[in-house]
């Protein structure tokens, strides 16, 4: 079994433990064994698959233009 993540359970907010596993607070990704929240896609695999997809496409595809006025922050 993969080591538990070194943070609190996002579901019950307590230290992540075997209890969380039994209660289904977190599940292991079937591909990479990372701990993920049930029903959520694995960020590790998603990042890896995105990187692989980029590689296949030769890195030619650009991101669509994002609106430039949306990042105004209050200081
Ligand atoms: Zn928990
Ligand atoms: Zn994964």
Image: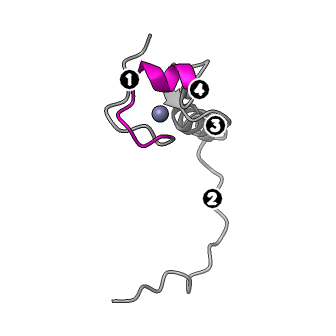
Contact, mark 1 vs mark 4 (Cβ under 8 Å): no
- Asked if the residue under mark 3 is in contact with the one under mark 1, i.e. CB atoms within 8 Å, the reply is no
Q: CA distance from mark 2 to mark 4?
A: 39 Å
Q: Magenta segment, which residues? A: 12-23
Q: Is mark 1 within 8 Å of ligand 1?
A: no
Q: Are the residues flagged by discs 2 and 3 in contact, CB closer than 8 Å?
A: no
Closer to viewer: mark 1 or mark 4: 4
Q: Which residue is mark 1?
A: 4
Q: Say what secondary structure mark 4 lies in.
A: loop
Whether residue 32 can be seen here: no
Residue hosting label 3 = 41
Give residue 65's quadrant in the image: bottom right
Q: Are marks 2 and 4 in contact (CB under 8 Å)?
A: no
Frontmost of labels 1 and 3 is: 1
Q: Position of residue 73 (x, y in %)?
A: 42, 85
Say whether residue 45 is left or right of residue 56. left
Q: Which residue is mark 4?
A: 24
Mark 1 vs mark 3, CA separation in Å: 18 Å
Measure the alpha-carbon separation of dots 1 and 2: 37 Å
Whether the residues at callouts 4 and 3 have beta carbons within 8 Å, the answer is no
């Amino acid at each position: 079994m993969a080591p538990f993540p070194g943070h609190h359970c996002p579901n019950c907010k307590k230290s992540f433990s075997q209890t969380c596993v039994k209660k289904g607070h977190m599940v292991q990704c079937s591909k990479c064994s990372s701990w993920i929240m049930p029903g959520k896609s694995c960020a590790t695999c998603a990042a890896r698959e995105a990187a692989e997809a980029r590689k296949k496409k030769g890195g030619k595809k650009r991101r669509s233009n994002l609106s430039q006025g949306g990042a105004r922050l209050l200081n």
